[in-house]
Amino acid sequence: MNEIVMRLGLESWKPLLGALLLPPLPALLVVVLGGLLWRRRLGLALLGLGVAALWLEACTAVAEPAKRWLLQPPPALEAAALKGLASAGTAIIVLGGGREAFAPEYGTSSLGIYSLERLRYGLWLSRASGLGVGFSGGVGHAGMQGEAEATIAARLAAEEFRHPLRWVEDASRDTRENAARSVALLKPQGITTIVLVTHDWHMPRARRAFEQAGAAAGMALRVVPAPVGLAGDDSLPLLRWLPSGGGFTLMRWVVRERIGLLMGS
């Protein structure tokens, strides 16, 4: 499906096409349809179904199990495993997760919260292992103006974290391009193992993309998952069944990533 979108020249429409399938829009459409048919039993049933869906998809008590069942993300990278990775043929690669084209408080562009979390962990891994670290991220399919994510990440890594990046890939627009362009950058340097840093809900699709990119490049590429964002909701059990921004955001990511896996994107 992803290939069809590309061949039709609809790359810039990918964010919109994907958003149409994500919560809360499907449930809202069910509610609207139920409202139009409210005088019939079917309409009342649809109203109830839509409202229940809107409620449940915003609960962490539903979103967290959905993440485990639908995505099966890997566990945290253990310290012992990290120590065994130190070699000349290994690189840490951090995937971009969004940027702020202009952050007024800084007077310049900045990374979004997901990118910052990934960058911090990637640099932490680099310090702990001595491995070089790179960042992959452009401006996305929407083609927004401003600095690429990787350019911003390089600046923050050097100026604020005092740990410069070794590799910067700033032309990719999505996960598949993250993988293809990163592999093309690293292959000539003899890299055969990548410690991949991204959020746990994104890792299954990202890992697959890098393995496919390695195979396409004729490499026996080993991809070691190093997920972030593993901490769950520690609220009281009852509160986890109440709608929250955190639960809703997580469910959107879960649905988005599952659709991406099914579409091959």
Image: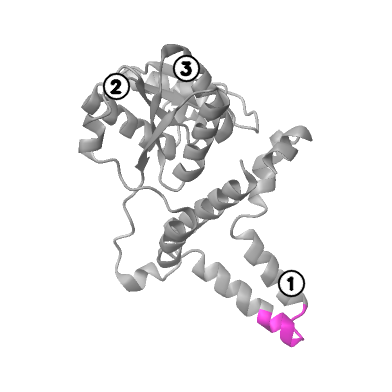
Q: How is the image coloured?
A: one colour
Query: Where, by quadrant of the figure, is residue 242 drawn?
Result: bottom left
Left/right of residue 10 with respect to residue 148 in the rendered view? right
Q: Residue at x 33, y 18 (%)?
A: 159
Residue nearer the viewer, 5 or 151: 5
Which numbered dot is residue 33? Answer: 1
Q: Earlier in the sequence, mark 3 or mark 2?
A: 2
Location of residue 118 with respect to 164 vertically, above or below: below
Q: How many dots with numbers?
A: 3
The label number, if any, that marks residue 81 in the structure image: none
C-alpha span from label 3 to label 2:
16 Å
> Looking at the image, which is closer to me, 119 or 209?
209
Quadrant housing the N terminus: top right
Percent across and percent down for residue 209 are 53, 35
Residue type at the position of mark 1 = Leu
Q: Residue at x 30, y 27 (%)?
A: 123
